[in-house]
Amino acid sequence: MEKILEATNIWKSFRKDDKNRIEVLKGVSLEIYRGEFFCLMGPSGVGKTTLLHILGTLDKPDSGRVLYSLDGQQIEIQNKNNDELAKLRNQKIGFVFQFHHLLPEFTALENVALPLIIAGEKEKVALAKAKELLGTVGFNQRLDNKPAELSGGEQQRVAFARALINRPEIVFADEPTGNLDSKNTEQILDLITRLRKEFFITFVVATHSTKVASAAQRIARMKDGIIFEIALNEV
């Protein structure tokens, strides 16, 4: 299998007060393969979100290496400046969060189209592509409704469409089903599985849910800032 991402000996701490720091990640290493559904699993406070942000280039480690393999090139994240990282995120990486972060003043359709418009696409073309992608994730109605007028499951589908609009190679999702009931959770997991197979997108999901983890191909179990096991899942 082809590696898309490799993290080696990642350490990260945050300042607690003037004299003390909290070690959140303590030498984490992992490999993620192209097209797989990879799960970071563990209870709150073990470092899942911090690791996800570092892997997704939203944050940098204190030490260690994050290496992407994209378009036949090796990209070392720690050697890139903020503008270069922003360009990489816009072109190659998608994000879905527990709290969907949809812009409340825009419709579902506009929320999905915005990344394309910001990237320079003409508005008419961007809206057409957004509508098509919303259909792909099973959101065919209420396109002109604003986020507050949508259910939690609908909001998360819109968030997935927005994450996919620039055709990323890898999508990071932080507790994407954390605010959903069991039915909507099942639908989101089915969506991840379908999108992974249809578009060969890599999904890296942080969760405390055994149900979410059971749908992944590999599970990295975390505690106290370390990964203590990476297991193959029979799915």
Image (cartoon, helix red, strand yellow):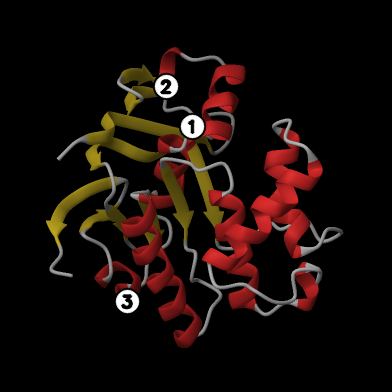
Distance from disc 1 to disc 3, alpha carbons, whole Å, reads 27 Å
Image quarter where the C terminus lies is: bottom left
Q: Earlier in the sequence, mark 2 or mark 1?
A: 1
Q: Residues within 10 Å of mark 1 (few under 14, many from 20)?
A: many
Determine the residue positioned at 80% across, 72% down: 145
* Kind of element beneath mark 3: helix
Judge by depth and name the residue closer to the eye, 83 or 40.
Answer: 83
Please, is residue 214 above or below residue 129 in the view?
A: below
Q: What amino acid is labelled 1 in the image?
A: Thr
According to the picture, the residue beneath numbered tag 1 turns out to be: 57
Q: Earlier in the sequence, mark 1 or mark 3?
A: 1
Distance from disc 2 to disc 1, alpha carbons, whole Å, reads 7 Å
According to the picture, the residue beneath numbered tag 3 turns out to be: 211
Q: Residues within 10 Å of mark 2 (few under 14, many from 20)?
A: many
Determine the residue positioned at 50% across, 35% down: 14
Q: What amino acid is labelled 2 in the image?
A: Ile
Judge by depth and name the residue closer to the eye, 69 or 41.
Answer: 69
Please, is residue 75 above or below residue 195 in the view?
A: above
Q: Quadrant of residue 194?
A: bottom left
Distance from disc 2 to disc 3, alpha carbons, whole Å, reads 32 Å
Mark 2 near mark 1, Cβ–Cβ under 8 Å?
Answer: yes
Please, is residue 126 above or below residue 37 in the view?
A: above
Judge by depth and name the residue closer to the eye, 73 or 97.
Answer: 73
Q: Earlier in the sequence, mark 2 or mark 3?
A: 2
Q: Is residue 164 left or right of residue 193?
A: right
Q: Is residue 154 left or right of residue 168?
A: right
Q: Is residue 217 left or right of residue 14?
A: left
The label shown at residue 77 is 2
Residue 71: percent from left, percent from top: 36, 24
Determine the residue positioned at 47% across, 63% down: 175
* Kind of element beneath mark 2: helix
Residue 13: percent from left, percent from top: 44, 34
